[in-house]
Amino acid sequence: MDKQPRLLLDNVSMVFERAGQSFTALAPVDIKVPAGRFVSLIGPSGCGKSTIFNIVAGLQLPTTGNVLIDGDNATGTIGRVAYMLQKDLLLPWRTVVDNVALGMEIRGVPMKEARERALPLLQRYGLGGFEHSHPSALSGGMRQRAALLRTLLIDTDVVLLDEPFGALDAQTKAQMQEWLLQLFEDFGRTVIFVTHDVEEAVFLSDDIYVMASRPGRVVDIMPVDLPRPRDRSVVSTPRFVAMKKYCLDLLHGEADAPLGPEPVAA
Amino acid sequence: MNTKALTDTVMNAARGRAIPATPTRQRRVVRRLPVQKNWPPAVIAAAQFGIFVALLALWEVAADLKVIDPFFWSQPSTIWSTLVVFFTEGNAFTDIVYTFESTLIGFVLGTVAGALLGMSFWWSPNYARVMQPYVVCLESIPKLALAPLIVLVFGMGIGSKVAIAIALTIVVSTLTAYAGVRAVDKDQERLFYSIGASRWQVFSKLVVPSCVPWIISILRVNIGLALTGSIVGEFVASEHGLGRTILYAGSTYEISLVWVAVLVLATLSMVMYVIVGWIEKVLRKGVDR
């Protein structure tokens, strides 16, 4: 891969000092994400997934290493990537369209223009008719949709999704995954996705980084060579099943180890 | 059961052994959910009104029969005629407006200043930490005890009443707004920063709107406090106001006038409560959705 990666984590690690003891939340990792790729991080709690996210988003400074976006050193700078959590974090006093426009508004786009750009997307991606409702009127799945649209409308190439569907029921989750794939193909962004769910990771990703805890580290990188566009039927193909099994085995290699305390993420 | 047997039972239970069932079978008591019949609203209202009238009648008769001394207790009929005089010949409206004005100004200034002060603590945690003991100190001072001093400093006029009303309302407002600041979701703050927001943007688009429901919640408390502040200010020294009327009437043994002023004051307080409650409802509709 001689082409410059969109996102590069170079020897990034995180060590916390607590009560005179140092605690390694993340052993040095290298992650290389080419433009337009969908990369998932899977692993048990405390494997440093959220630490990686905070470092990439510039919310935390790594102990060692650098984050490079398109070759620029972006360590500790905010506003370079879009970031979404399991909680939708929609502002209850704003309408759906104003929530979705938040990122653009903060980046200095006039509110009127931001709304004009958000409205057709709400129509197209299943929030039509709810543009001027408040988030409390929306179901969990719709709230996550709004949160995801808000994330995508922050004009950054790199999008970080931290277990965005973790709190949804199985059926809604499946719908949201298919919807996310559609968005991924429409928007052509580079996505880093954190999940506990192996099937979700295999279904969505181009590359899967399997992580382990104590200390948080990457144990293997698995490319997913399933053709795109994918639909739900892919989950029963032998290739999909084999990859899922391989990931699970990797994760279960860790299952014997005692479960440590969760590191304090910032 | 003697002590020994009791100890044995407890020990058995502790060892996880089954305790032998008592051979006597108890008769099962049949019990149903208690049913409560609700009276129609008219009956409730009639009962309430009936009690009110009965109390007034009792007071009137007891005073007539000298069971209670009408000089100190006055009686409803005298109070009523004093009320009519107060409104037709006295300076009722000057007093009402005076008290209402100082309450309202104190309420608005105290609430706004307190809310701004409380929210300003978000801006710098260091500043908040430095200010902490002063806020606690301000909270624990019995502000009403300072009323004579405040009147000395601000004079006999409406300024001193407003100042006492502010002193009472500002602390509650500050503490509540600060509680609102601390309740702002940290993840929400991180989301704003991850987008690249400035501190001012986080403050104006996240912190202030999050605090609005907290500030709304203290409006009703503050209107009561502001009224108390104004009245106490008038007690200390004043030329007008319902508080001054009460003090003046009390010192000249015009007990019926004391009752009249208290009655008017209660009405004023209720009206302000209703208005603030209505404002609260309107504001909440705009915020909590």
Image (cartoon, coloured by chain):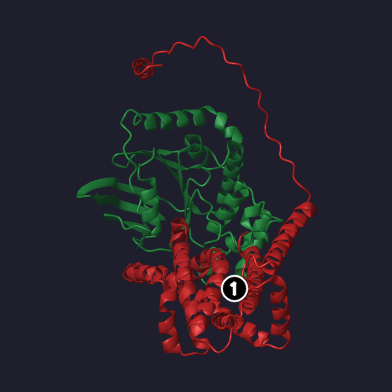
Where is B83 relative to A95, above or below? below
Residue found 36% across the figure and 48% down from its top: A31
At label 1, the amino acid type is Phe
Q: Position of residue B187 (x, y in %)?
A: 45, 56
Q: For this view, does A60 lie left or right of residue B171?
A: left
Residue A48, x across and y down, in percent: 35, 45
The chain whose colour is green is A
Taking depth in this image into account, of B212 and A45 the one nearest to the observer is B212
- Residue A220 shown left or right of residue B25 in the figure: left
User: Quarter holding the N terminus of chain B?
Assistant: top left
Q: Position of residue B231 (x, y in %)?
A: 54, 78
Residue B278 visible (yes or no): yes
Q: Quadrant of residue A5?
A: bottom left
- Left or right: residue B246 compared with residue A216: right
Does dot 1 land on a helix, a strand or a loop? helix
Q: Nearer the viewer, residue A171 or B169?
A: B169
Q: Nearer the viewer, residue A126 or A4?
A: A126
* In the image: residue A170, left or right of residue B184: right
What residue does disc 1 label? B72
Query: Label 1 marks which chain's residue?
Result: B
User: What is the display colour for chain B?
Assistant: red
Answer yes or no: is residue A81 visible: no
Quadrant occupied by the C terminus of chain B: bottom right
Q: Reply above or below: B91 against B54.
A: below
